[in-house]
Image: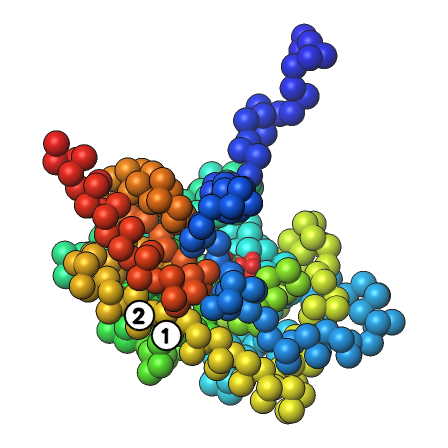
Amino acid sequence: MTSYSESPLIPAASNRPGDDPIFTLHGEAVRRAGLGEDILNATLGALIEDDGTLAVMPSVHEALRRTPLQKASAYAPISGPPDFLKAVEHDVFGGHALESKCVAVATPGGSGAIYAAVNNFLEVGQKALTTSYYWAPYDILTGLSQRGIATFNMFGEDGFLDLTAFEKALFAILEEQGRALVILNSPCQNPTGYSFNDDEWRDVCDIMAKASDSGPVTLLLDFAYAKYAPVGGADWRTHVERILPKVPTLVAWSASKAFAQYGARVGALIALHEDDKVRARIANAMGFTCRGTWSNCNHMGMLAITDVLHDEDLRAEWDADRARLVELLDARVVEFNKLAEKHNLHYPRYEGGFFVAVFSDDPKVTIKYMQDRGVFIVPLQGAVRVGLCATPKSKIPRLVEVLAAGVEAARKTVAS
Ligand SMILES: Cc1ncc(COP(=O)(O)O)c(C=O)c1O
């Protein structure tokens, strides 16, 4: 019999970490800054102005301010307000033919969308396939419902996506579990900053179409950073449209970065399928997940985002607000690339986005070296993640200098 002093939690929940590792690192950076140290905190994934305050969009605040409170106070429809869903679909497809082949449900941010996708497109015990560098919460979003993550080596020797590794892993997972859910995060992948080019999208889609002869393959595109894509970047829609008859596609859409509204928890899961009847079944399944988890989402947030997307004037203001933030971030990317090259840092192609991953022989040594000098970034496997989103441009020289020395310290440790 379990004694009263033992944990009443089930074994799987008994030893959960109390905080997300990135928030823990952030907490330590804030604590030391509070003691008066000159701390450079490049841990979190929120865009910060060069003066250190959170970057926000006045257009979105205006929409929130003018949202009818009576309407916002009511429950939202479980699958999301139809106008909101239409607006989001249009934001993603912008009149592309794919817009007529999708259904969507509202989710609490992109996180909710990923959770809903995993719960409907994988059986318990199965794993989603993603790149070897990936956003760490995928582990929790899949693990909580007894699914998991499998990975393929992300970069080949040439620095491009390792398509050979992808193909091999996809066929292996299909053989093992009879179905595959492939999670890809592009543009501006977290944590590497990598955006697939047109050739990579074409080849990835060809591989998935080929693999779908061996079992159902579904693509989940994590679209969290879509609005920060490099100018003239690849159009994934052309390739997805081509393989849609064989590979249904999901898009995890998020208002967090696109509207600088991290706290509003507005998101959507969009599903593309050729067949009307299957689409209706997918919509029902996704709505069922909504009801069984968060029930319905933040009504005020969804009404405000709908207003921004629908109202011509507000939309124009949002375009301008966004352009300013993209410019703010892009200036940091240019500065980082210039200085990183000078210091001979190794990292994947970086053309925009909140983060970049820099390779290190021993990330723990690099992180410790940097923290001792007041610079906080995030360790990964074989690399470290630098949040340029949270680094004012004037602080990038310090960041790169300490980072380069930290990478060198790791190299020496491993070589000795
Ligand atoms: C790669 C990636 N996907 C999805 C999300 C989901 O964000 P949210 O749940 O705030 O929409 C994030 C947020 O940091 C992210 O970095």
Task: Report if residue 103 is visible in the image.
Answer: no
Q: Residue at x 19, y 59 (%)?
A: 343
Q: Which residue is situated farthest in the front direction here?
A: 36
Q: Secondary structure at mark 2?
A: helix
Circle 2 residue: 335
* Residue type (three-letter) at the residue carrying disc 2: Glu
Q: CA distance from mark 2 to mark 1?
A: 6 Å
Q: Is residue 94 above or below residue 294?
A: below
Residue 27, position as x, y percentages in the image: 53, 43
Query: Based on the displayed image, in which of its 4 quarters is residue 210 positioned?
Result: bottom left
Q: Secondary structure at mark 1?
A: helix
Circle 1 residue: 331
Closer-to-camera residue (58/82): 58
In contact (CB < 8 Å): disc 2 and disc 1: yes
Closer-to-camera residue (323/49): 49
State left or right for residue 279 relative to residue 162: right
* Residue type (three-letter) at the residue carrying disc 1: Ala
